[in-house]
């Protein structure tokens, strides 16, 4: 039994060549110059373009899921050993909640119906494609991964202090309402800010290719509102009068497990190539875009990491491992919006700007005494806002033609550069205001009813004295090991002399 497929004729791109072969790879038929109209049935039956697009999307979505591993590692690096299990449990349950809620209502709210056969072109979000009736499975799977990332960002800001019940309740509201509405406005085929809409209200639409605003700003601003309602962890803001207090404060700022922090950062960097490159949502005719996206993502992350590490050496007086990890993540966030519409050289400039914004954010939060354990707001909220800004600043007509599909380009390039930049500012304001207002309402109600703060926070008081003693014991143990090693070296030297 033979199978057939069609290839483009190199001498005439409008004509196909039909090749048939057996399971033993023997060619049984080769017919040149099949007419395009005659080849449509064969193309539909034997072409693999649709399957290749699906494979690309599914694989990159799986890469995005690696971000959950990275976030889990980083959160574990900051948290006391007796609370790690609690955080891991919340992350797993939270991911499961996102999946179920997004399947039932979130995806319909975000995209409505993708089937073009529907008569009502102005359909409102959430009224069609409930429970994926349109069978848009590939799209649901990829978009769910973005939702899971955004919700986990929030978990980083409110970790160690919120109750499990309040976190689960917020995840439901976030997955069903807060996040999907922003997606509908900015990415759907009917959103008023979306460049994919035929008639976006700001002419041209918002350029946010991989979610600097849609994913990261929503997560970052939600997290900072939650952190402000929860208050600070004990020993987060202490005077430096005593070394003991200073050590406790440093442990709150940077955590205790740098191995987990670095492993989490590398997992995130690895998964980010699915996050940005996979946003092409296919492989056919867009691999050049995906390749450029991979390059700009790498250059921006590397630049921000190096810049933040240098700033730490200049300002804080030492090379800081946690700072370079934060810098890499901030660069990855900042490049998401513009990774397809900027030249590679601008990626380096954006990386440097992200490092400056990161350090300004660190000092502002420190000055305001706001406790954000993983700097989620600085990395994702501020970094995401910068990502939207630079899309309007550095994108040109030529780079937009390269980075977007042909049906979207006319709406973007017909708008002036100033209009595009103004649209990006509108997007920042809309995303931040929507997120902040909703989160104030949700977190405020939870705090009013006394279910937001973890029950054991006051009783346990984080047991800082015990943790400090454990840390001191570990340091003393390492010092004893070093003394024993020196004694062994002296014995060997004496034996050699003898």
Image (cartoon, rainbow, N blue to C red):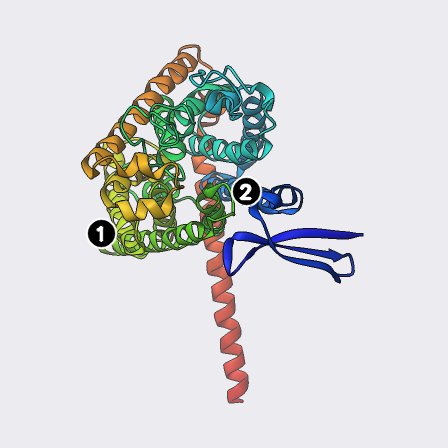
Label 1: state its secondary structure. helix
Looking at the image, the residue that sits furthest to the top is 449
Q: Nearer the viewer, mark 2 or mark 1?
A: 2
In this picture, is 175 found above or below 295? above
Query: Residue drawn 50% across and 57% down?
Result: 12
Left or right placement of residue 339 versus residue 131 in this view = left
| Towards the viewer: 397 or 16 | 16
Q: x and y percent of residue 486 in the render?
A: 48, 71
Query: Residue drawn 54% across and 89% down?
Result: 498
Q: x and y percent of residue 197 in the render?
A: 38, 27
For label 1, the residue is: 315
Circle on res. 409: none
Circle on res. 57: 2
Label 2: state its secondary structure. helix
Q: Is residue 107 visible?
A: yes
Q: x and y percent of residue 317 in the render?
A: 25, 55
Looking at the image, the residue that sits furthest to the right is 1
Q: Residues within 10 Å of mark 1 (few under 14, many from 20)?
A: few
Q: Mark 2 near mark 1, Cβ–Cβ under 8 Å?
A: no
């Amino acid at each position: 039994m033979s199978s057939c497929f069609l290839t483009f004729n190199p001498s005439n791109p409008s004509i196909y060549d039909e090749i048939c072969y057996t399971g033993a790879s023997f060619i049984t038929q080769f017919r040149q110059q099949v007419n395009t109209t005659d080849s449509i049935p064969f193309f539909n039956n034997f072409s693999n373009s649709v399957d290749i697009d699906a494979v690309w999307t599914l694989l990159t979505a799986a890469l995005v899921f690696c971000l959950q591993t990275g976030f889990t590692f980083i959160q574990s690096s900051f948290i006391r050993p007796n609370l790690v299990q609690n955080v891991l449990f919340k992350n797993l349950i939270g991911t499961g909640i996102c999946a179920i809620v997004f399947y039932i209502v979130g995806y319909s709210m975000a995209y409505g119906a993708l089937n073009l056969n529907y008569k009502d072109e102005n359909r409102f979000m959430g009224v069609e494609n409930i429970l994926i009736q349109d069978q848009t499975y590939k799209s649901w799977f990829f978009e769910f991964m973005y939702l899971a990332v955004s919700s986990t960002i929030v978990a980083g800001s409110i970790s160690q202090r919120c109750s499990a019940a309040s976190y689960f309740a917020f995840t439901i509201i976030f997955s069903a309402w807060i996040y999907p509405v922003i997606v509908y406005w900015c990415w759907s085929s009917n959103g008023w800010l979306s460049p994919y809409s035929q008639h976006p209200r700001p002419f041209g639409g918002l350029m946010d290719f991989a979610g600097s605003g849609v994913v990261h700003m929503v997560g970052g601003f939600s997290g900072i509102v939650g952190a402000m309602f929860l208050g600070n962890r004990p020993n987060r803001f202490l005077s430096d009068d005593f070394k003991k207090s200073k050590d406790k404060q440093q442990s709150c700022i940077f955590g205790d497990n740098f191995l987990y922090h670095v492993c989490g950062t590398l997992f995130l960097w690895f998964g980010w190539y699915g996050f940005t490159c996979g946003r092409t949502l296919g492989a056919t005719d867009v691999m050049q875009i995906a390749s450029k996206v991979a390059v700009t993502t790498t250059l921006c992350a590397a630049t921000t990491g190096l810049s933040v590490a240098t700033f730490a050496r200049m300002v804080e007086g030492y090379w800081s491992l946690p700072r370079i990890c934060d810098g890499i993540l901030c660069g990855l966030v900042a490049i998401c919006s513009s990774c397809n519409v900027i030249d590679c050289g601008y990626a380096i400039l954006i990386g440097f700007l992200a490092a400056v914004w990161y350090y300004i954010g660190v000092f502002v939060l420190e000055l305001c005494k706001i406790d954000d354990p993983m700097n989620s707001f600085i990395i994702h909220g501020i970094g995401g806002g910068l990502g939207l800004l630079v899309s309007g600043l550095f994108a040109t007509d030529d780079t937009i033609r390269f980075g977007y599909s042909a049906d979207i380009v006319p709406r973007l390039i017909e708008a002036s550069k100033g209009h595009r930049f103004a649209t990006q500012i509108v997007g920042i304001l809309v995303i931040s205001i929507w997120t902040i207002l909703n989160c104030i309402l949700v977190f405020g109600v939870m705090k009013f009813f006394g279910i937001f703060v973890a029950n054991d926070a006051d009783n346990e008081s984080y047991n800082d004295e015990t943790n400090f003693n454990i840390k001191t014991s570990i340091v003393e143990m390492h010092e004893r090991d070093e003394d024993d090693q020196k004694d062994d070296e002296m014995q060997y030297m004496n034996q050699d002399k003898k």
